[in-house]
Image (cartoon, grey):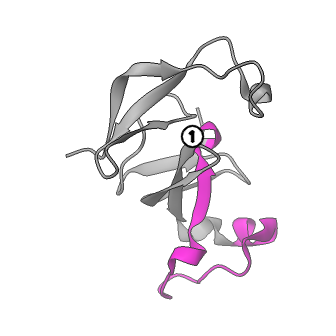
Amino acid sequence: MSRFKRSDYDSVLKADSPYTPRLTDKPTPLFTDADTESLVMWSGEGDIPEVGDIVDMRVPVRYEGVVKGHFFGYGWVGLKVLPYPQHHEALSKQGYGKLPKEGEPWTDVDLVHNYGVDLQA
């Protein structure tokens, strides 16, 4: 069963919101979160990737990996991604520290955190 399901509702930020720079021509889709039984905002196109889905990200550098979990920040749901080993060096140079080499254990701290707007279109 999917954790996130598209709701019948969209969100619209008020003009005096601190997130006004994020306003677009269209409302932000809201999803129901089965774990928290609440509505969550998603900044990407389409459905929210589930744990185990393979994603192609473009920030901080282009990389591919597997979704290992979700996080919430600044009102949005985000993705915790385990990047494929061939991307470790490039990501390490972008401030993620020295990522584990292939075969070494990973911790939650090693996962790369991204929002939906970071998905490669």
Q: Which residue is the extreme one toward the top?
A: 25
For image coordinates 41% across by 44% down, the residue present is 49
- For residue 77, say whether it is visible: yes
Q: Is residue 112 magenta?
A: yes
For image coordinates 75% across by 18% down, the residue present is 15
Q: Which residue is the extreme one toward the front?
A: 16
Q: Looking at the image, is 14 positioned above or below residue 36?
A: above
Q: Secondary structure at mark 1?
A: helix
- Measuring from the top left, give residue 4's x and y in whole percent: 34, 41
Residue 98 found in image quarter:
bottom right
Residue 97 found in image quarter:
bottom right
Is 112 in front, or is 15?
15
In the image, the segment drawn in magenta is: 89-118
Q: Is residue 113 magenta?
A: yes
- Measuring from the top left, give residue 9's x and y in whole percent: 41, 20
Q: Looking at the image, is 69 positioned above or below residue 28?
A: below
Residue type indicated by callout 1? Gly
Pointer 1 local density, CA inside 10 Å: few below 14, some 14–19, many at least 20: many
Left or right position of 108 against 92: left
Identify the residue under disc 1: 116
For image coordinates 69% across by 20% down, the residue present is 14
- Measuring from the top left, give residue 96's x and y in whole percent: 72, 71
Total tally of numbered discs in the picture: 1
Q: Which residue is the extreme one toward the bottom?
A: 104
For image coordinates 71% across by 22% down, the residue present is 23
